């Protein structure tokens, strides 16, 4: 069981480093150290895969998250009264 657990930990470590490397290329996070990103921020990110025509956030909803688009295209709309 120890080897299995070590294998899972290694997979998680690699996933975290991929995220850290991605974040280093986002201007908002580019000046932060890899260590800070890995130890303080990486665990707070959630990967979200959206399908075509999915609504990610609706106007008027509280802003309780920040979305970083890694790839793909999104349309932003605003209602005018």
Image (spheres, rainbow, N blue to C red):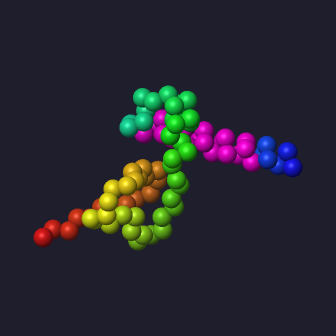
Relative side of 56 to 3, left or right: left
To which quarter of the image does residue 43 belong? top right
Q: Position of residue 71 (x, y in %)?
A: 46, 53
Q: Position of residue 50 (x, y in %)?
A: 48, 64
- Judge whether residue 13 is colored magenta: yes
Relative side of 25 to 9, left or right: left
Q: Residue at (44%, 57%) from the top-left corner?
A: 72
Closer to the camera, 26 or 67? 67
To which quarter of the image does residue 32 belong? top left
The relative height of residue 21 versus residue 59 in the rendered view (above or below) is above
The relative height of residue 78 versus residue 16 in the rendered view (above or below) is below
The relative height of residue 72 versus residue 6 in the rendered view (above or below) is below
Q: Residue at (51%, 61%) from the top-left corner?
A: 49
Number of numbered tags placed on the structure image: 0
Furthest residue in direction left, as rendered: 81
- Judge whether residue 2 is colored magenta: no
Closer to the camera, 73 or 15? 15
Q: Position of residue 74 (x, y in %)?
A: 37, 60
Q: Residue at (39%, 68%) from the top-left corner?
A: 55
Q: Position of residue 46 (x, y in %)?
A: 52, 53
| Residue stretch rendered in magenta on the structure | 8-26
Relative side of 6 to 15, left or right: right
- Could one spot residue 35 in this view of the protein? yes
Magenta region, main secondary structure: helix
- Could one spot residue 21 in this view of the protein? no
Q: Residue at (75%, 48%) from the top-left corner?
A: 8
Screen quadrant of the C terminus: bottom left
């Amino acid at each position: 069981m120890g080897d299995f657990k070590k294998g899972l930990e290694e997979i998680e470590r690699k996933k975290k480093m991929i995220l850290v490397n991605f974040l280093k290329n986002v201007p908002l996070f580019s000046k932060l150290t890899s260590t800070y990103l890995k130890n303080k921020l990486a665990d707070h990110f959630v990967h979200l895969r959206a399908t075509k025509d999915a609504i990610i956030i609706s106007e008027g909803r509280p802003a309780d998250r920040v979305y970083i688009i890694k790839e793909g295209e999104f349309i932003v709309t605003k209602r005018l009264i």
